[in-house]
């Protein structure tokens, strides 16, 4: 195997130096973690599925004009991405109460929210990713006011688009997390979507049965994690089987 320079190793992904300046190779591992890394497992095939699902969703988002770091998929587990300076925030968009929102506010999981809600969390493992307000973000300089506006506007567009996309294949987008980065083009800097969008970072429920098709299957020991991710990929028309690279397009659920 070619030796390449490791840039960053996270819980589920590894970043290597890319072939050209300003690019990185993003490698998707099979590792699953939850509860601030306290729960761990290797889920065979998860990395392959997340690579494909994230590729598909990022490509669709490019088509509607949501700028993002994805350049092209290199192989089963790797994609070429633009190098950005990651903004140390997790931007969560919620449509339906679940997870930490349900716990914090005592809302029954599955309760539709009066409108989509955006939350920010500071990316800091030692502090367990605390929720922060826009006041904190601008006061401590994690992002500027214009950057916050840009991230919020992009998060809303991503939510509207993905909600519709998933609804079309019989899946409810409950909530998701995205990360953004700064991309410099000469003197100009713009905010683009980075990281990944996959069932590791979204809550997806089957429209008819409410069955969970996301990482909650791992967090809550429900089993069938990669099977659920695979079903998401199938419904999106990404894979009919793992080895098949032919793309057939989304499968409309009537
Ligand atoms: N999420 C994520 N990474 C995190 C925390 C949350 O991808 O470090 C995603 C999670 O999968 C869900 C959404 O963000 O789709 C909202 O998560 P929540 O705040 O409910 O936290 P959780 O219950 O997952 O701890």
Image (cartoon, rainbow, N blue to C red):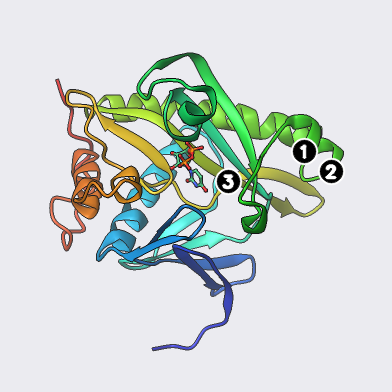
Select label 3 or label 2 by which is in front.
2
Element on which disc 3 rests: strand
Give whichever of 94, 54 is nearer the camera: 94
Vertical order, 93 against 232 (above or below) = above
Q: Is residue 31 visible?
A: no
Q: Residue furthest top?
A: 114
Asked if disc 1 and disc 2 are in contact, CB closer than 8 Å, the reply is yes
Asked where in the image residue 73 lies, by quadrant, the reply is bottom left
Select label 3 or label 1 by which is in front.
1
Quadrant into which the N terminus falls: bottom left
Label 2: which residue? Answer: 140
Q: Residue furthest right?
A: 139
Counting other residues with Cα less than 10 Å from the Cα at mark 1, is it few (<14), some (14-19), or many (20 or more)? Answer: some
Q: Which mark is residue 137?
A: 1
* Identity of the residue drawn at 21% across and 33% down: 211
The answer as to whether callout 2 falls within 8 Å of ligand 1 is no
The answer as to whether callout 3 falls within 8 Å of ligand 1 is no
With 133 as the anchor, is 75 left or right in this view?
Answer: left
Per the model, the C-alpha gap separating discs 1 and 2 is 6 Å
Element on which disc 1 rests: helix
Q: Which mark is residue 179?
A: 3
Give whichever of 202, 251 is nearer the camera: 202
Q: Position of residue 187 (x, y in %)?
A: 82, 51
Asked if disc 3 and disc 1 are in contact, CB closer than 8 Å, the reply is no
* Identity of the residue drawn at 48% across and 30% down: 103
Q: Position of residue 183 (x, y in %)?
A: 68, 52
Element on which disc 2 rests: loop
Q: Is residue 245 visible?
A: yes
């Amino acid at each position: 195997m070619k030796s390449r320079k490791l840039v960053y190793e996270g819980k589920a992904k590894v970043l290597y130096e890319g072939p050209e300046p300003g690019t990185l190779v993003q490698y998707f591992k099979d590792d699953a973690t939850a509860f601030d890394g306290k729960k761990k497992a290797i889920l065979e095939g998860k990395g392959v599925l997340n690579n494909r699902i994230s590729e598909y969703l990022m490509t669709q988002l490019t088509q509607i004009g949501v700028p993002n770091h994805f350049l092209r998929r290199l192989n089963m587990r790797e994609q070429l991405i633009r190098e950005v300076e990651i903004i140390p925030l997790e931007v969560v968009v919620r449509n339906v109460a679940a997870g930490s929102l349900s716990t914090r506010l005592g809302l029954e999981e599955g309760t539709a929210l009066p409108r989509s809600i955006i939350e920010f969390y500071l990316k800091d493992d030692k502090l367990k990713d605390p929720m922060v307000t826009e006041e904190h973000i601008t006061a401590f300089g994690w992002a500027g006011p214009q950057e916050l506006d840009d991230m919020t506007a992009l998060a809303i567009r991503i939510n509207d688009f993905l909600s519709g996309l998933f609804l079309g294949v019989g899946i409810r987008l409950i909530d998701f997390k995205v990360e953004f980065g700064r991309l410099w083009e000469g003197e100009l800097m713009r905010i683009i979507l980075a990281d990944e969008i996959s069932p590791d970072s979204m809550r997806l429920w089957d429209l008819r049965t409410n069955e969970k098709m996301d990482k909650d299957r791992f967090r809550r020991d429900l089993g069938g994690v990669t099977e659920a991710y695979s079903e998401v990929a199938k419904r999106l028309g990404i894979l009919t089987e793992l080895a098949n690279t032919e793309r057939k397009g989304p499968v409309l659920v009537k």
